[in-house]
């Protein structure tokens, strides 16, 4: 999987910030554990999770817009 360099830099920044944020550190440890279980590198796992979250959000927004359009007709 080809992970964009910009995404890797964001993840690296988050890792640095996790030193001061317990919940962020916990999330990063969870991603690391998932990457090991799925036999992929950390960046690939983080990218897959971010992509899934984005897809879910976009699908939800599309559905809400569609429902709002149907209700206004």
Image: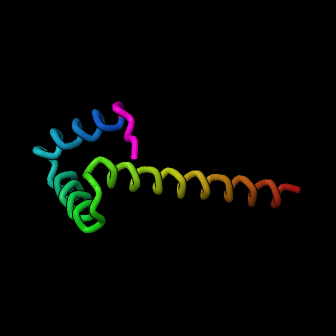
Q: Position of residue 25 (x, y in %)?
A: 17, 53
* Residue 64: in magenta span: no
Q: Position of residue 39 (x, y in %)?
A: 27, 62
Q: Is residue 50 or residue 18 the one in the foreground?
A: 50
- In this picture, is 42 found above or below 35? above
Which quadrant of the rendered structure holds the C terminus? bottom right
Q: Is residue 32 or residue 15 the one in the foreground?
A: 32
- Count of numbered labels shown in the rendering: 0
Residue 50 placement, left or right of 58: left
Residue 38 placement, left or right of 67: left
Extreme-bottom residue of the structure: 37
Q: Position of residue 70 (x, y in %)?
A: 82, 59
Q: Is residue 73 or residue 1 the one in the foreground?
A: 1
Q: Residue at x 26, y 58 (%)?
A: 31
Q: Residue at x 53, y 58 (%)?
A: 56
Extreme-left residue of the structure: 19
Quadrant of the rendered image containing residue 9: top left
* Residue 5: in magenta span: yes
Q: Residue at x 30, y 65 (%)?
A: 38
Magenta stretch bounds: 1-6
Residue 60 placement, left or right of 17: right
Q: Residue at x 22, y 36 (%)?
A: 13
Colour option used: rainbow
Residue 13 placement, left or right of 49: left
The dominant secondary structure in magenta is loop
Q: Position of residue 54 (x, y in %)?
A: 49, 50
């Amino acid at each position: 999987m080809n992970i964009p360099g910009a995404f890797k830099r964001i993840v690296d920044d988050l890792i640095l910030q996790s030193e001061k944020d317990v919940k962020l550190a916990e999330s990063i440890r969870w991603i690391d554990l998932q990457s090991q279980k799925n036999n992929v590198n950390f960046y690939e796992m983080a990218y897959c999770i971010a992509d899934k979250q984005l897809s879910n959000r976009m699908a939800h927004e599309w559905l809400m817009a569609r429902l709002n359009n149907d209700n206004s007709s």
